Image: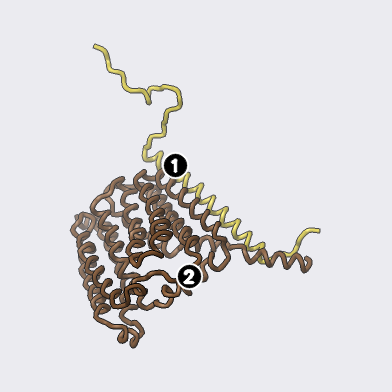
Amino acid sequence: MTDATTNNITQAAAGEARFGDYILLLKPRVMSLVVFTALVGLVIAPGPIDPMIGFTAILFIALGAGASGALNMWYDADIDQVMARTARRPVPAGRVAPTEALSLGLWLSAISVAMLGLATNLMAAALLAFTIFFYAVVYTIWLKRATPQNIVIGGAAGAFPPMIGWVAATGAISIEAVLLFGLIFMWTPPHFWALALFMKSDYHRAKVPMLTVTHGRAETRRQILIYTILLVPVALGLAITPVAGPAYLTAALILNAIFLHGAWQIWRRDEATAEADGYAVEKRVFRFSLTYLFLHFGALLADAALRALGLWG
Amino acid sequence: MPITETHELHQRRFGRNLGVALCLVGFIVVVFGLTIAKIREGASMEAFDHQPRVSVTPPVEESR
C-alpha cells in the first residue's frame, strides 16, 4: 500500500460511522425507559394478548421512540455540539452525517408505525405516529428553543408509550391509559428541573431557554414544588382504578410522600445553601425521581402478577 | 495485486455490514413470528381477489 492510499483511507475513516453509532442515534437509554413503560401499559391492560404480538408491539414502539431520537439528534446537532453532555453524540462528533440521521429517523418512523399497525391496531399506530411527530416537530423543531415550558411539552412525548402499549392491547383509550400518560407527564418537569438546577452551565451555554435561565432559579424551585403537588393526585388517582392493587397503593403513598418532601426541601432552599453543600438535595431528589417512576410502574406489574395468580381482584 | 493489508476502516465497514445483516434477519424472524401468531389467533386472511366466492359474498335469504 502506498503512502497516498493510506492517506486516503485515513481521511475516509474519519467520516465513517460504526454500527454502534447508528444505535446511539436511537438514544438507547431513553428506549429502555420506553420499553419498560410500554410493556407495563400492555401487560396491565385487560384482555389477553398473544406473546409474539405483544413482543412485536413493544419492539416497534421502542423503534418509533428511537426514530424520534434520531430526528432529534439531526435537528439539534448545533446545540449538542455546545453542551458537554451531548458533544460526543455521533452527529456533533462528525461520525454520522446529519442527512444520514435524518433519513434513518424518517425510515424507522415509517417502518415502526406500519409494523405496529399491522401487528396490533390502527389506533396504536396513529398514536405512535403522533408521538414521533410531537417529539420531532412540536418539541424539537418548534418549541424547545422557543419557550421555557419546553420540558413540560417534551414530557408529553415521553408520556405516550404506556398509553400506546395499553391501546395496542385493547384498541381503545381509557381512563387508566390517560392516568398512565398523566403520571409521566406530571413527573417530567420536577425530574428535569431538578437536573437543570445542578447542571446549569450546559443549558445556559447552548442558549436553550431553560426555566432556570429565563425565570431564575428561585422560580424553578417553586415550579418543581407546584408540579410535584399536581403529580400526587394523578399518581394516587391511578390507585383507585381496576389496574392498581395493594402494591401500587402502598408504593404510591410512600413514594409520593417522599417526593413531595424532597420538592418542599428544594423550594425552601436558596442558591447560597445549595452551592454550599454542592446541590446535595437537588441531586438526591433527581436520583429519587428515577426510582419513583420505576417503582410506580413496577408496582402496577406486581399487582397484575397478583391478579394473575388469583391473589387479588 | 490483491490488497492483503486491512485497515481499521475495513473492520468498521465489516461491523456495519454485519449489524445491518443481523437487523434484516431479525426483521424477517419478527415478521414470520407475527404471521404465525396472527394465523394462530384466527385473524382473517382472506381478501377480495376479484373472484366472488362463498366466504366473501353476503348470505342469501332462503325464499319461502
Which chain is disc 1 placed on? B
Label 2 packing within 10 angstroms: few (<14), some (14-19), many (20+): some
Circle nearer the viewer, 1 or 2: 2
> What amino acid type should be assigned to the residue bearing mark 1?
Thr
Expressed as whole percent of the image width and height from the top left, the position of residue A262 reads 26, 76
Residue, disc 1: B35
Separation (CA) of disc 1 from disc 2: 40 Å
Instruction: Residue A208: give x, y in percent of width and height.
Output: 41, 69
Which chain shows up in brown? Answer: A
| A143 on left or right of A89 | left
Chain that is yellow in the image: B
Which residue does the numbered mark 2 point to in the structure image?
A86
Please identify the quarter of the rendering in which residue A234 is found: bottom left
Residue A220 lies left or right of residue B7; in this view the side is left
Q: Quadrant of the C terminus of chain A?
A: bottom left
Task: Locate residue A7 relative to residue B61 in the image: left or right.
Answer: right
Residue A238 vs A223, above or below: the answer is above
Q: Residue at x 45, y 24 (%)?
A: B50
x then y, percent, for residue B44: 38, 34
Q: Is residue A163 visible?
A: yes
Quarter of the image with the N terminus of chain A is bottom right
Residue at mark 2: chain:
A
Residue A287 seen: no
Residue A168 x %, y %: 34, 48
Asked if badges 1 and 2 are on one and the same chain, I answer no
